[in-house]
């Protein structure tokens, strides 16, 4: 009941704040204007992450006193730093180096001060306990990858919020079952805030979360996934909800964002572009080209994300050496199938469209005749009113 009340508190605050935020952002003209890579056709206010971060803050202020602050204070501080980085980038676009620097400060707080990091591969690829510095570097890389992978999928009404809702629901339930209450509280308050935001972000969206929201969500989920992986490995053998493929379970929780990031980066590099060059090659762009609406694409991709989590439940007693290749190959095969279907659809669509008429250059004689006819037309007595 306690966690339900915390979730309801965050939802209520978010639901009340978001309409006010929409009105304010519209007056300040802070948002996304149509054009370029943008899918929407009208001005939509951005920075919607402010609403659910405010909702989480209020809910934690009310219900967080039940648990010792030292447990999560560095994590909460890191989340605040990431929120400020995203907020600053939405107001005035930051240089990529400055943005990464801000993210690194938040990452260092998590892996250094909170000691939330990957310490052991537990036999995956034949690797056991990691060297301290290797652990720090690998954990920092993983957390940055998870954060920015999630940031990249925020390009469709309701998509990022729906994926985040699935992940926070799983994490909240898992942490609660294993009495990791402070982590459960963070998960459930974020869940409540996001559900309230989705009421206004679902297609047709009235507000976008912007980097303010997507960076904060991606970072929070990434940090909690690292905590989940380590706490999961510490459970005694045979414990309920213990996943033998711990690494695979962490990957599955962010399977769609990670696959989409890898896919987009590879396509851009193969075309001679930089990996961070913006374009319309994301999975949701391909599905939109097939004529699917925003909400249908969101539900389809959310279902696939849920399926990958369910797949880990099915193989929960197998090792990472078996499960990780299975989910990776499954994602790649589904992605290739999607590309094939989309290409066939686009070709079929182009084939039935009228061809553009080719206009050939005029000869000197034709030009002279055209001038003569134009002169005759101009000299004629016509009513041009």
Image (tube, helix red, strand yellow):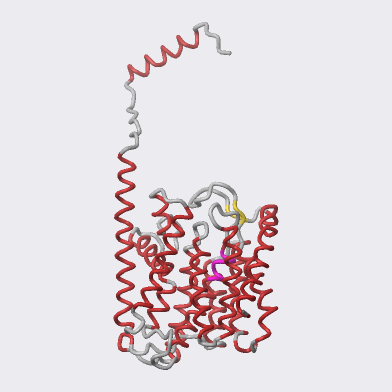
Secondary structure predominantly adopted by residues drawn in magenta? helix
Magenta stretch containing residue 357, yes or no?
Answer: no
Q: Which residue lies furthest to the top in this view?
A: 381
- Frontmost residue, 239 versus 58: 239
- Frontmost residue, 313 versus 217: 313
- Frontmost residue, 233 versus 357: 233
The percent coordinates of residue 120 (x first, y second) are 40, 89
Is 266 on the left or on the right of 59, as rendered?
Answer: left
Residue drawn at the location 61% of the way across and 76% of the way down: 4
Q: Is residue 234 above or below residue 78?
A: below
Q: In which quarter of the image is the C terminus?
A: top right
Q: Quadrant location of residue 118? A: bottom left
Q: Quadrant location of residue 376? A: top left
Is 272 on the left or on the right of 91, as rendered?
Answer: left
The percent coordinates of residue 101 (x first, y second) are 55, 74
Magenta stretch containing residue 212, yes or no?
Answer: yes
Q: Give the range drawn in magenta.
A: 211-217
Residue drawn at the location 36% of the way across and 83% of the way down: 245
The percent coordinates of residue 362 (x first, y second) are 34, 23
The percent coordinates of residue 303 (x first, y second) are 42, 64
Q: Residue furthest front?
A: 1
């Amino acid at each position: 009941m306690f966690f339900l009340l915390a979730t309801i508190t965050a939802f209520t605050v978010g639901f009340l704040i978001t309409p006010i935020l929409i009105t304010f952002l519209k007056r300040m003209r802070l948002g996304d204007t149509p054009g370029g890579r943008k899918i929407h056709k009208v001005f939509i206010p951005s920075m919607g992450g402010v609403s659910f971060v405010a909702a989480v803050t209020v809910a934690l202020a009310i219900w967080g006193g039940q648990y010792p602050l030292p447990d999560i204070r560095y994590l909460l501080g890191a989340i605040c730093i990431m929120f400020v980085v995203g907020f600053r980038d939405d107001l005035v676009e930051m240089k990529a180096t400055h943005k990464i620097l801000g993210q690194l400060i938040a990452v260092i707080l998590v892996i250094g001060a909170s000691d939330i990091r990957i310490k052991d591969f537990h036999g995956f690829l034949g690797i056991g306990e990691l060297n301290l510095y290797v652990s720090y570097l690998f954990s920092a890389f993983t957390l940055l990858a998870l954060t920015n992978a999630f940031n990249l999928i925020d390009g469709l009404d309701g998509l990022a919020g729906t994926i985040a809702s699935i992940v926070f629901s799983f994490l909240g339930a898992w942490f609660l079952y294993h009495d990791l209450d402070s982590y459960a509280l963070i998960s459930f308050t974020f869940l409540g805030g996001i559900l309230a935001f989705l009421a206004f972000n679902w297609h047709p969206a009235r507000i976008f979360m912007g980097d303010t929201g997507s960076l904060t969500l991606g970072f929070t989920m990434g940090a909690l996934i690292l905590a989940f992986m380590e706490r999961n490995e510490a459970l005694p053998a045979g414990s309920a909800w213990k996943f033998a493929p711990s690494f695979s379970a962490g990957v599955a929780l962010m399977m769609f964002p990670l696959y989409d990031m890898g896919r987009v980066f590879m396509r851009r590099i193969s075309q001679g572009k930089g990996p961070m060059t913006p374009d319309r090659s994301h999975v949701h762009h391909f599905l939109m080209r097939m004529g699917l609406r925003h909400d249908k694409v969101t539900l389809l991709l959310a279902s696939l994300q849920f399926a990958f989590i369910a797949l880990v439940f099915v193989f929960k007693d197998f090792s990472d050496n078996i499960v990780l290749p299975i989910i990776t190959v499954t994602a790649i095969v589904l992605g290739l199938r999607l590309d094939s279907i989309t290409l066939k659809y686009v070709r079929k669509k182009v084939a039935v469209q009228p061809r553009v008429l080719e206009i050939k250059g005029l000869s000197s004689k034709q030009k002279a005749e055209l001038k003569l006819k134009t002169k005759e037309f101009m000299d004629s007595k016509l009513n041009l009113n």
